[in-house]
Image (cartoon, rainbow, N blue to C red):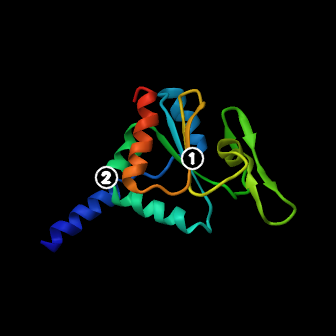
Amino acid sequence: MNTIWLLLLTAIVHAQQEPLSFKQLADSMAVHPKPVVIKIVTNWCPYCRLQDRQISASADVQQVLQNDCYFLVLDAEQHMPVQFNDTTYTFYSNGSANGIHLLALKLIGNKPAYPAWVVLDEKYVVKGTYAGMLKSRELLRFLRLYLREQGS
């Protein structure tokens, strides 16, 4: 019995795909456009880690993120530039080590909270945002609401 559970757990873990990079997104959209979901996080955010665990535990959420959209993760405090929709976004420092990535600022506005969820259509127009952690069921409802609007 324990062997069966171990095999099922292994299959679920291997079924999870890693989020796309922004470079992969550009290439994928050129071949097959579809909506985009971006989860914006920080390294220090405990709710971001809890959100990751909830995603890992929900086969339904994983299925939506793998099949109905392109899924990306953006670290709101990363210092590396990001090329997105023909624009290069960089880190904006507030004079110390703190700051925010300008792409995160563009997507979630002036009052960031983490994790933040952003749904874009195939032309990268923001269709829905949510700042804060969502339980699996709420996240699934949020994703389906905005992805359904896109015809997925």
Name which residue lies at 82% across and 57% down: 93
Upstream in the sequence, badge 1 or badge 2? Answer: 1
Q: Foreground residue, 65 or 140?
A: 140
Q: Foreground residue, 75 or 7?
A: 75
Q: Residues within 10 Å of mark 1 (few under 14, many from 20)?
A: some
Q: Quadrant of the C terminus?
A: top left
For mark 1, give the secondary structure: loop
Name which residue lies at 62% across and 61% down: 42
Judged left or right of residue 133, residue 92 is right
As shown in the figure, which amino acid type bears the numbered disc 2?
Ala
Counting from the top left corner in percent of width and height, residue 95 is at 87, 62
Residue situated furthest right in the rendering = 95
As shown in the figure, which amino acid type bears the numbered disc 1?
Ser
Which residue is identified by label 2? Answer: 59
For mark 2, give the secondary structure: helix
Which residue is identified by label 1? Answer: 21
Counting from the top left corner in percent of width and height, residue 100 is at 74, 55
Name which residue lies at 70% across and 32% down: 86
Counting from the top left corner in percent of width and height, residue 52 is at 46, 60
Residue situated furthest left in the rendering = 1
Q: Foreground residue, 30 or 61?
A: 61
Q: Quadrant of residue 9?
A: bottom left
Name which residue lies at 47% across and 30% down: 34
Instruction: Look at the numbered discs 1 and 2 and tell me whether their residues touch, using CB distance below 8 Å.
Output: no
Q: Quadrant of the N terminus?
A: bottom left
Residue situated furthest bottom in the rendering = 2
